[in-house]
């Protein structure tokens, strides 16, 4: 079943502005783990804003084509209804924190959709645990470090248990183990709850490890798409676009141009090299 | 002859309210060094570096910059010696053209108009933003804005340049551009201190690594030494670059030093694999 | 200054409504009297509440700040109020007379201002944002949207001040003497802060709106995570405060407490 169907989507921020998205066609199935990457300014954030309804509900501009969420057009849905099934994490952790303390931040959305206190308590505890910030539960949001803020933002949208989670650079300020933890959580949600995950990031190492499908954006178009193995085999093209290739994949590619199964993770790399040695 | 020390931190303690963030930090940075500061989120990296230009003053202990204790200096005085590129470019841009933005710092140094113009032009060229000199900074992409902020500091030619996560949110190409630019500055004699979470960048560019963990310095050594230390992972919650992990995982008599970059790995492995792997 | 200060105190545990009642009662009492000893007593009670809440030291700091305003108010009175018995002259040759009435009135006005502001600062320092929202919407049945907007605006003040600090830090870090004593440099620096500040604030406000709506804000089935019940203590406190106000009004109607 398709969660999203995107038909010939184009977008400009204004009549006199250049096109940012140029005719995107895509379907996303329930339970996919989509990784999006590409050079800065390629339109990744803009695309994600079309998925979670910020375009057209908040951001003005010229939209053509259609985005269907569960077979209904996003434009005709109310923001509240979209929020019920799509959770969002934005690229700037500072501007998406609404509340003064962490607990309240997590509870905000749950109160809005009218859960009872017992359920809220469970959801909050669980989301804090998953993102590894249980100890920050009663901290003031203003006193958090950049990385801690980002985790709070993720926890806040996790608590809603949406059908789809759309994340824009959710780990840009996180340390490696924090990034790994976030991707592990996403992986777990994806595996166990069948949650559809759509994440834009420059950290391609992690996409290689966790994504089921990767989309490479450039100048408002999807220029490359496929399983991580297939995408990271196209290294000439990726280099041209300025996309980072996982180190292991780069090494393997340089050692042997036409590897059948390009190794992406350290374990796969070890396996591969030991086979060759 | 050892270069003179530009920053000296002695028994530095700092707290926000009653939350102790830095616990007895000691370190010395010498002229011409290229230092990376790494550590988990909330380890106190930003808090530490904000002491280097006097934005924060020690609760106890001393921070000496260019021979003077920061406690007695104003930030605007220290700015002549220490340039600081903040993590968020949007808090450091406040003019309506890129050129004015870059000129702001230099003007504060009280130089002649001609010198100011030259320095601005040079800095803009260094970051590859000549053609944007009349643009409105907020119309640029985040990566470009970050480079404007960098140019603004470069134009002042401070002895020491501190960069707080200069490459977050940049794509690979921009990231490399920024790092290579910093490397050139270092070769020209500037002392560079940068904070990052990107271990591959540390491996490729830094010469010395300071690992901060819960407000204490866990390690302070060359990149090779830190990345081969077995306790590194466990204690600091950090992870080695994957190419280094790969090298450490291979037990082969020919591989002695850790791989820091893909190039190194390639040069070591290629002869070992011989002809049959490379068709 | 108007930030919540977490403490374990009976004042903190009171329902926001009780504290709000108290703050309004202080305001009413401070407004109906203008005799200095009466006002001093009211200010004294506010300080006692601050002591009970364990925020005495912070409030003294606030009081010190308010004192500057107070002096200003007294000076204004002295300059513009010329009736009554002349005590002395500010300038030689009998220029600028200072009258007893002007002084008394000025001091009374200052005390009034300090009392009212301080009681609200104590209220805000002992009451959490979220509890206030719940009290106002759930108990007083005010519309959630307006309450939330008002509280967010209030909350934005420290955020805004924080932004000013950040921008000024960035200026100082580039050698601008905003941290010096040169007045012209400082004024110039302030005008430069204005532009990025407006931009940053606008972007912040927009981001906040988006963040709220994408998390289901605006549906009408809202529940509350932690409801603070109105306890018996709260009722007793509110009743006592009510009695005090009534008593105050009666005393005033008897003609006491006015100059
Ligand atoms: N609010 C806006 N008004 C006008 N133009 C905009 C706006 N937001 C983005 N743009 C432009 O649209 C283009 C695509 O921006 P977008 O943020 O989608 O890129 P991105 O791929 O997410 O980049 P990054 O990796 O830097 O986040 C850029 O050229 C940008 O300058
Ligand atoms: N203004 C502040 N007020 C109170 N506490 C703060 C403040 N800034 C930072 N902290 C706390 O101090 C600790 C260290 O913060 P700091 O910003 O130095 O961390 P960092 O190492 O730079 O982390 P990151 O990698 O996430 O940026 C954190 O636990 C944070 O919560
Ligand atoms: Mg983006
Ligand atoms: Mg930091």
Image (tube, coloured by chain):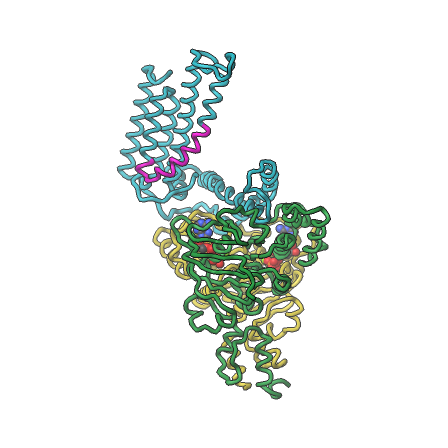
Chain colours: A yellow, B green, C cyan
Q: Quadrant of the C terminus of chain B?
A: bottom right
Rendering quarter of residue A18? bottom right
Q: Does the image show residue A88?
A: no
Residue B30 within the segment the image draws in magenta: no
User: In front here: C71 or A235?
Assistant: C71
Please provide percent x and percent y for residue A271. Answer: 51, 81
User: In front here: A221 or A234?
Assistant: A234
* Residue drawn at the location 62% of the way across and 78% of the way down: A254
User: In front here: A168 or C108?
Assistant: C108
Farthest residue toward the front? B1
Residue B241, relative to residue A270: is it above or below? above
User: In front here: A66 or A160?
Assistant: A160
Q: Tell me where the magenta segment starts and ends, as one range.
A: C50-69
Instruction: State the predominant SS element of the stretch in magenta.
Output: helix
Please provide percent x and percent y for residue B227. Answer: 49, 71
Q: Quadrant of the N terminus of chain B?
A: bottom right
Please provide percent x and percent y for residue A71. Answer: 55, 59
Q: Does the image show residue B10?
A: yes
| Left or right: C134, with B270 as reference point | left
Residue C65 within the segment the image draws in magenta: yes
Residue A264, relative to residue C47: is it above or below? below
* Residue drawn at the location 61% of the way across and 63% of the way down: B186
Please provide percent x and percent y for residue B238. Answer: 46, 66
């Amino acid at each position: 079943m398709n969660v999203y169907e995107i038909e010939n989507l184009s977008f400009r921020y204004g009549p006199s502005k250049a096109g940012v998205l140029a005719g995107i066609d895509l379907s996303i199935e329930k339970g996919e783990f989509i990784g999006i990457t590409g050079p800065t300014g390629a339109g990744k954030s803009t695309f994600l804003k079309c998925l979670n309804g910020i375009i057209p509900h908040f951001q003005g501009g010229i939209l053509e084509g259609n985005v269907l969420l569960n077979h209904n057009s996003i434009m005709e849905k109310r923001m509240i209804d979209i929020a019920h099934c799509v959770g969002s994490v934005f690229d700037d952790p500072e501007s998406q924190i609404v509340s003064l303390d962490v607990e309240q931040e997590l509870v905000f959305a749950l109160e809005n959709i009218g859960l009872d206190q017992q359920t809220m308590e469970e959801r909050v505890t669980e989301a804090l645990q998953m993102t590894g910030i249980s100890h920050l539960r009663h901290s003031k949001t203003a006193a958090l470090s950049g990385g801690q803020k980002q985790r709070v933002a993720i926890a806040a949208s996790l608590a809603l248990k949406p059908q789809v989670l759309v994340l824009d650079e959710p780990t840009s300020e996180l340390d490696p183990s924090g990034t790994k933890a976030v991707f592990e959580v996403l992986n777990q949600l994806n595996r166990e709850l069948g949650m559809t995950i759509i994440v834009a990031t420059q950290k391609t190492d992690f996409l290689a490890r966790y994504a089921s499908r990767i989309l490479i954006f450039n100048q408002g178009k999807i220029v490359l798409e496929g399983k991580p193995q297939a995408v990271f085999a196209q290294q000439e093209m990726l280099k041209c676009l300025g996309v980072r290739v996982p180190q292991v994949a780069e090494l393997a590619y340089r050692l042997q141009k036409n590897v059948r199964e390009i190794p992406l993770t350290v374990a796969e790399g070890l396996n591969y090299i030991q086979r060759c040695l | 002859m050892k270069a003179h020390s530009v920053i000296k931190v002695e028994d530095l303690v700092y707290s926000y309210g009653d939350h102790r963030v830095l616990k007895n930090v000691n370190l010395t940075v010498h002229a011409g060094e290229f230092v990376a500061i790494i550590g988990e989120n909330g380890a106190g990296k930003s808090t530490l570096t904000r002491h280097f230009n006097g934005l924060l003053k020690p609760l106890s202990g001393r921070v000496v910059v260019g021979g003077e204790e920061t406690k007695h200096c104003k930030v605007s005085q220290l700015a002549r010696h220490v340039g600081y590129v903040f993590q968020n470019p949007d808090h450091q841009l406040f003019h309506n053209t890129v050129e004015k933005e870059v000129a702001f710092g230099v003007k504060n140094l009280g130089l002649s108009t001609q010198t100011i113009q030259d320095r601005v032009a040079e800095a803009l060229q260094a970051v590859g933003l000549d053609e944007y000199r009349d643009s409105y900074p907020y119309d640029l992409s985040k990566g470009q804005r970050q480079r404007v902020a960098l140019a603004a500091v470069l134009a002042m030619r401070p002895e020491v340049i501190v960069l707080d996560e200069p490459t977050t949110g940049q794509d690979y190409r921009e990231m490399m551009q920024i790092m290579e630019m910093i490397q050139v500055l270092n070769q020209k004699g500037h002392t560079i201190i940068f904070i990052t979470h990107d271990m591959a960048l540390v491996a490729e560019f830094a010469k010395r690594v300071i690992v901060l963990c819960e407000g204490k310095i866990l390690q302070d050594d060359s990149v090779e030494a830190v990345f081969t230390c077995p306790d590194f992972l466990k204690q600091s919650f950090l992870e080695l670059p994957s190419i280094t992990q790969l090298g450490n995982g291979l037990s082969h008599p020919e591989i002695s030093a850790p791989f820091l970059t893909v190039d190194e790995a390639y040069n070591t492995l290629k002869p070992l694999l011989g002809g049959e792997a490379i068709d | 200054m108007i930030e919540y200060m977490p403490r374990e105190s009976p004042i903190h545990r009171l329902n926001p409504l009780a504290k709000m009642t108290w703050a309004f009662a202080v305001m009413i009492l401070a407004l109906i009297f203008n005799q200095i000893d009466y006002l001093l007593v009211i200010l004294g009670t506010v300080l006692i509440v601050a002591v009970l809440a364990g925020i005495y030291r912070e409030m003294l700091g606030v009081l010190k700040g308010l004192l500057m305003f107070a002096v200003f108010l007294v000076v204004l009175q002295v300059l513009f109020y010329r009736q009554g018995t002349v005590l002395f002259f500010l300038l030689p040759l009998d220029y600028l007379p200072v009258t007893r009435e002007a002084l008394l009135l000025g001091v009374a006005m200052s005390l009034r201002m300090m009392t009212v502001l301080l009681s609200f600062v104590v209220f805000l320092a002992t009451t959490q944002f979220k509890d206030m929202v719940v009290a106002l919407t759930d108990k007083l049945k005010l519309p959630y949207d307006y309450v939330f907007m008002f509280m967010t605006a209030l909350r934005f003040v420290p955020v805004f001040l924080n932004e000013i600090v950040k921008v000024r830090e960035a200026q100082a870090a580039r050698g601008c003497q905003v941290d010096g004593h040169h007045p012209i440099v400082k004024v110039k620096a302030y005008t430069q802060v204005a532009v990025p500040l407006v931009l940053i604030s606008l972007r912040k406000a927009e981001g906040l709106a988006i963040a709220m709506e994408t998390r289901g804000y605006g549906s009408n089935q809202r529940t509350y995570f932690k409801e603070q019940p109105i306890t018996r203590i709260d009722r007793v406190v509110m009743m006592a405060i009510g009695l005090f106000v009534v008593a105050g009004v009666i005393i005033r109607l008897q003609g006491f407490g006015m100059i």
